[in-house]
Image (cartoon, rainbow, N blue to C red):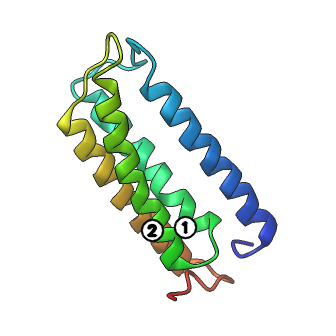
Amino acid sequence: MLNSLLFRRAMLAVWICSVAATIYLSLLPGLELPVKFWSADKVLHLLGYAWLGALPLFALATGDTARRVAYCMIALGGLLEWGQSFVPGRASSLMDGVANAVGVFLGIWLAETILARCRGCQGLADE
């Protein structure tokens, strides 16, 4: 199932929509979080970028290409953090950028673990 073309195309569409939603939400002025606890935004950054880091591994056919695309999410997170410094009511944060990067690495690791343990799938081909 994970190697089917339909599944890969669906994952690619989900990933593209997720990137677009992340860009939109990151650049909204004065966005309030629905949860209130210490460092809630760091947890949301970590989870969001884990999602963005994992999806390319399910969406793209080769492991090296998928990993390169996933690593680009670190650059996207950095650019969006920098962009937030120009948005009223928002501020850029180095720790948010770190949470983004850690999230990407976590997402890649989780996706590779799932693909390696999946029965009936070959995992990522290292090319």
Task: Provide the residue designation for mark 1.
Answer: 57
N-terminal of the two: label 2 or label 1? 1
- Between 50 and 15, the one nearer to me in the picture: 15
63 left or right of 45 in image: right
Q: Where is residue 72 in the image (x, y as percent from the top left)?
A: 42, 57
Q: In which quarter of the image is residue 77?
A: top left
Task: Provide the residue designation for mark 2.
Answer: 68
Q: Where is residue 4 in the image (x, y as percent from the top left)?
A: 77, 73
Q: Which residue is located at x 52 percent, y 69 percent?
A: 66
The amino acid beneath tag 1 is Leu
Q: Is residue 113 above or below residue 41?
A: below
Which of the two marks, 2 or 1, is nearer to us in this view? 2
- Between 51 and 83, the one nearer to me in the picture: 83
Q: Where is residue 6 in the image (x, y as percent from the top left)?
A: 81, 64
Count of numbered circles on the image:
2
Q: Which mark is residue 13?
A: none
98 left or right of 54 in image: left
Q: Which residue is located at x 52 percent, y 28 percent?
A: 24
Find numbered disc 2 in the image and state the secondary structure of the residue it sits on: helix
The amino acid beneath tag 2 is Arg
Marks 2/1: CA–CA distance: 10 Å
Disc 2, disc 1: CB below 8 Å?
no
Q: Which residue is located at x 34 percent, y 61 percent?
A: 105
